[in-house]
Each structure stands twice: as C-alpha cells, then as structure tokens.
Amino acid sequence: MKKVEAIIRKSKFSNVKKALHEVGVNFFSYWDVTGLGNEKEGHVYRGVSYSTSDIQRRYLSIVVNDDFEEVTIKAILAAASTGEVGDGKIFVSQVDEVYRIRTGEKGGNTLK
Amino acid sequence: MELLTINNVWMMICTALVFFMHSGFAFLEIGLTRQKNTINILFKNIFIITVGLLLYYIVGFNLMYPGDFNGVFGFAGFGLEAPLADGTFDLAYSEGYTYWTDFLFQGMFAATAATIVSGAVAERMKIGAFMIFTVLYVGFVYPIAGSWQWGGGFLSSLTIGETEGFYDFAGSTLVHSVGGWAALVAVYLLGSRIGKFNNGKSQAIPGHSIPLATAGVLILWLGWFGFNGGSVLSADPEATSLTLVTTCLAAAAGGVIAMLTSTILYKNLDLTMFLNGILGGLVGITAGADQMSPGDAILIGAIAGALIVFAVSLIDKIKLDDPVGAIAVHLICGIWGTLAVGLFGAKAGFDQFAIQLIGVLCYAVFCIATSFIIIYILKKTVGIRVSEREELEGLDAHEHKMDAYPDFRLNEH
C-alpha cells in the first residue's frame, strides 16, 4: 500500500476531487495549509506595497493499494496543473499496514 | 406643543443614530487591525461609551453648557436638574427638544472624541493608561472646548468686520479635530508599532477583517444622518432634509475621489482608502452641512477624499503610525471642513474664513496642550506602552486573557 500526499492549489481542489472519483479513489483526507515556496504574491495596503511568500494551499493525504498508485498520481498531475510556478508537489511513500477500526480487519481490502 | 413633540421625536431618533455610530467605530477599528488585539479594542470602545455617558452626566453637560459664563470656562454644577416652571417640567426649555433629549444627544457626541484616539493608538497602548486618558479627555477637555462655541463661549461671538461668530455646525472641529489633535499627540508620544517602520521604510500591517471595516463605515455613514441631521436641533423640514442631502453627497464624493486618487497613485483598487474617503467626506461636510448647496457639498467631500489619500501617505512619511487613519480622517478633514465654511456656501467670505482659522488654531493649542500634558504625565508615571512581548503576542492575551475568536484558527502575524 502507498500513501500519496499532494499539496495543490485550493482553486484546483474540486477538479482533483472529481478526477480522483473518476479513477475510483473515493476515500481521502485533506486540510488547508500555509507554506513557503518560490511564488511571491504582491499586495498593496493603504498605499504601501508588500509581497508575501506565505502561500495558502490544500494538502491531500490518500492511502491506496499498490495497483491504484499510478492512476492516482496521473489523475492529480492532470487535474491540478496550471503550468505556473506554485502548482504544488506530490509525495509517495510506503504504508506498512492499514486497519479498519470498526471490525479490526487489516490489509488492502480495508481500502475498498 | 405638537411641534415640540415632532421636533423632540426627531432629536431622539438622531440620538439613537449617533449612539449606533459607536458600533461603527468599533467595527472599523477592529477590522483595520490584527485579530490578536480585537478584545482590547472592543473593550476600549465599550469603556468609552459607558464611562463617557456617566461622566457627561456628572460634569460634562454642565461644563459644556454652563449658561451665562465668562466665555472660556464655566460650570453649572454636578449632575442633571430638570428645569421647572411653576413646579412642573419646563417644556419651554427649547422649541426643538426637551432638557432630557438635549443631555442625551450631546452625551452621545461626547464619547466620540475619545473613540477617535482609540483607533490611532490601537495595538500598543496600555489599557489602564488609555482609561485614565479617556476619563480626563471626555470628562473635562471635550466639554470645556465645546463650551467655547456650542455653550455660547467666546468663539461663538468672535467678530471680524461685519461677521460674527465661529461656525461649526455639527463638529468638524469641536468633535473630530478635538479627537484628532489628541490622536496626533498620542501617536507621537507612543511611537509606532513593532514592525511598522523597518530600516526607515513603511511596512504594511493589513487589517484582519475588511468586511467588518466596511460594515463599520456604512454604519458610521448611517449614524451621520443623526450626527448632522440632529445638529439642526429641531425637525425643521428644510434644514434637516438639506443637511441629509449635503451629508450624503459629500460622503459619496469623498469616497469616489479617494478611490480614484489612490488608484492613480498606487495602481491598485484599495478598498480601505475608498472607505476612509467616505469618512473624510463626512467629517469635511460636518462643519457646514446646513450652509452648503448640493454642489458645494460635493466639492467639499471631493477635496476631503483627495486629502485623505495624501494625508495617509504624509503621516506614514513622517513616521507616525496611525493604524486606522484617524488623524487623516478626523484631524485633517476636520480642519478642512471647518475652513471650508469660509470658502463655500452661505457664509463664505474673507472675514468668516479668518474667524474659522482662528477657531481652528484655538482648538489646536488647547487640545495639543491638554492631551500632551495628560499623556506625557501618564508616560512618566504608569507608562503608556505595553511590553514588547505583550505587543507581539497580542493585547488580548495579556491585558484581557481572552481570545476574540476561540473557535477559529486564524493566521497570526
């Protein structure tokens, strides 16, 4: 099993969600994060210009069976891209075990 | 009798509208500052309206309206005493309102002067020092200053040539500049917020709720219907309706011109400047709202709107930190509005302009001197500035041990 984590633009979230559903990935968690990156946002407040590198993004954490890894990544890559700096990152890591709390059963079946 | 009833009802409506302005001020002030100081600002605003009203009952009303006096300082005694005629309440007190209405309408005004200062000193002044300042300024300085004109003092009869009397219809000077001068002095003695000026360059410290600031400005505009409309001191149909027209047109022109000016200067559609422009227009028209034609009102408001943008930038350049733009709005536009009575409208003329200028200078000297003495003594005794740690972590956590939004996690800065 793999954990696919993605940091994406908030504006791309509904696209990504739809794309994940289309390839059969129906369970995942997400939360809003603030981070630092290469993108700088220019602002003006009461006549004073300033820029901030504090970037607001959405963080998705998806655990899938090995055979879903590729379609999940492809779906995110296609749905979250604008081609501009700041589109985000995807991280993939190994997951040792998964348990379903209700029944206590473990393994890949719990992700279906 | 019937006329008095109608007049008095209008005056009580206006009293309620001026009261509502305190929520406008509170919203504007918390909107344009950081969330970590929200409780502190609301606390100050609530303190001002409650203690301000009580002080106005105890001494303020009779300091401001002492009856016959020497024109500079008079006091008609503590508390309120209903005027009696043949043992019953005297309705001949005024054609426009009863004694009780008079007290409450003027009392609502009194607190405003300290509210203006509250915005300018936001995010760094010790709450205790601010409360002492408020008691002295609202309780004594404001009513004494007010007596010079509205109480029948020396400015109301100042004569140059054929022209008699300083003119300040609803308080461009008596309310707004009186608060504005103290705000200027307080900001100077207090110093800027940590991080406002880095290496001599002004930094942006964005407010945490622009929707609240916007609501605040619209509430203030609504409140101004009472502030200016009630200053007619009766429900006179022509005077009240003209006053509301000039008030609203000046507000609109102030907003539009401030928006255009800041857009041209900074290539950015800045809502906060738009909002300050509306307030500038309102403060500007306040001194002559019943003397102007609609065209005059638009011109006065428009000039106030442009002044706001340049004043905000000037105050930044001389390293004074005024988080909500109180000095630009209330002091600069207050002076402008007072002088405008000598330039536009029914009273325009050189002699009137000279009288207006003398009036502005008298208030400048008195307000700068009194607020400097009060705040300087506070600075040398109890201290006026919170510690660096308190300022960085927020006044809410240290002065009040409360969180304005306990169930929301917001970006701290």
Image (cartoon, rainbow, N blue to C red):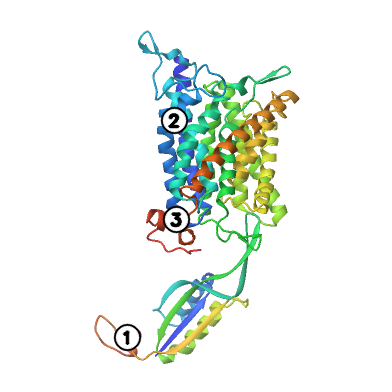
Front residue of B128/B279: it is B128
Few, some or many C-alpha atoms within 10 Å of disc 2 (few <14, some 14-19, many ≥20)?
many
The chain to which mark 1 is attached is: A
- Asked where in the image residue B307 lies, by quadrant, the reply is top right
Q: Against B151, is A34 above or below?
A: below
> Where residue B395 is drawn, which disc sits there?
3
The chain to which mark 2 is attached is: B
Which of the marked residues, 2 or 3, is nearer the chain's N terminus? 2
Question: Where is residue B395 shown, x and y percent of the image?
Answer: 44, 55
| Distance between the alpha carbons at the discs numbered 2 and 3 | 29 Å
Residue B353 as seen in the image, left or right of residue B13: right
Q: Which residue is mark 1?
A: A110
Question: Where is residue A58 shown, x and y percent of the image?
Answer: 48, 73
Q: Can residue B265 be seen here?
A: yes
> Where residue B56 is drawn, which disc sits there?
2
Which kind of residue does numbered mark 3 sit on? Leu
- Asked where in the image residue A31 lies, by quadrant, the reply is bottom left
**Callouts 2 and 1 close, C-beta under 8 Å:** no
Residue B142 as seen in the image, left or right of residue B245: left
For label 3, the SS is helix
Which kind of residue does numbered mark 2 sit on? Tyr
Q: Against B308, is B123 above or below?
A: below
| Distance between the alpha carbons at the discs numbered 1 and 3 | 50 Å
Which kind of residue does numbered mark 1 sit on? Thr
Residue farthest toward the front in the current orientation of the protein = B380
**Callouts 1 and 3 close, C-beta under 8 Å:** no
| Distance between the alpha carbons at the discs numbered 2 and 1 | 72 Å
Few, some or many C-alpha atoms within 10 Å of disc 3 (few <14, some 14-19, many ≥20)?
many
Few, some or many C-alpha atoms within 10 Å of disc 1 (few <14, some 14-19, many ≥20)?
some
Question: Where is residue B351 shown, x and y percent of the image?
Answer: 73, 23
Disc 1 with disc 3 on a shared chain: no
